[in-house]
Image (cartoon, rainbow, N blue to C red):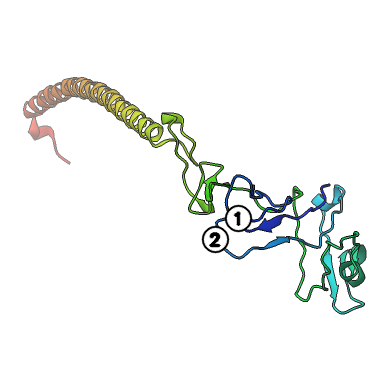
Amino acid sequence: MNSYMGSYLCDPDNTYSKCASPRNASTTPASNAMKPFNYQMDAISSNWPIHFGAYTGFYDYQVEWVTGENGYVRWMLQGEPLFEVTTESIVSVPQNANKTNPKKIMIEEPLYVIFNVALSSSWALKTGKCVEQRCECLYHSWGGPRCSTAVSGSSSAGLMSKTFGPPIEAAIAVAIVIILVTMVMVHMGSVATAKKTKAVMAALEAERKAAASVSAAPVSETNSSRGSYLAALSKDNYRQNFV
């Protein structure tokens, strides 16, 4: 469970120690790029550990928000309050001797519930730093004048340069290998199919010839027997054949 500590937002010329990259007044002259500012991002949040039942069932979450001097923000589960922030805790903030903690007002906008799998002590990601009055990106995947544009990274490392996906050279090489393997497999499949087709056709031709030779002999024998029978009938005494 990490408590939210907020982040300091400062102009490039700010020398405040809590800024992300305070300017060193002795080595870096002021650029006067913008009006000076220095404030801390803040949020009203609540951390509450949940048990295993939250992953196996359904629950009703609710935010109760009341504005005004006696208002409050209340997070609830199944109608039971879990955490509450009152207006007094926002308006009457603790102070030190120099009263550096700014006085706040009650939030006058709708609130909502954010469910985080992992919690962090600060918002967002640091994508760059200020070097000689210019932004220098910390990662190859960020670009632009303020290192806020997501781009494909590149470096002088060659084939294994840092990018979102594989290097273009590796992608082309893999594609060529896949094409060659596919062509070889198609050719081998065609040759095997042709051999099988030729063997099947030869077997069918042999069966056809065998069937033709077998059927020819009974036909000739039948014709000769029929001729002998007709010859015998011609020699009969028709005078004795009467009804």
Percent from the top left, x then y, of residue 158?
Answer: 41, 30
Residue drawn 42% across the image and 30% down it: 159
Residue 199 screen position, x and y as percent: 26, 21
Q: Is residue 35 above or below residue 132?
A: below
In front of the other: 24 or 73: 24
In this rendering, position of residue 216 left or right of residue 181:
left
Q: Are marks 1 and 2 in contact (CB under 8 Å)?
A: yes
Give the position of the C terminus as an image quadrant: top left
Label 2 neighbour load within 10 Å: few <14, some 14-19, many 20+:
few
Task: Name the residue type under label 1.
Answer: Pro
Mark 1: secondary structure: loop
Depth order, front residue of 210/50: 50
Q: Secondary structure at mark 2?
A: loop
Q: Is residue 48 left or right of residue 212?
A: right
Q: Using the image, tell me which numbered label, if any, was put on residue 33.
A: 2
Q: Nearer the viewer, residue 132 or 227?
A: 132
In the image, what residue type sits under mark 2?
A: Ala
Is 127 positioned to the left or the right of 227 in the image?
A: right
Pick whichever of labels 1 and 2 is earlier in the sequence: 1
Between the C-alphas of marks 1 and 2, the distance is 8 Å
Q: Residue at x 46, y 30 (%)?
A: 160
In the image, residue 31 above or below residue 170: below
Q: Which mark is residue 55?
A: none
Q: Residue at x 63, y 48 (%)?
A: 126
Q: Position of residue 232 (x, y in %)?
A: 10, 24
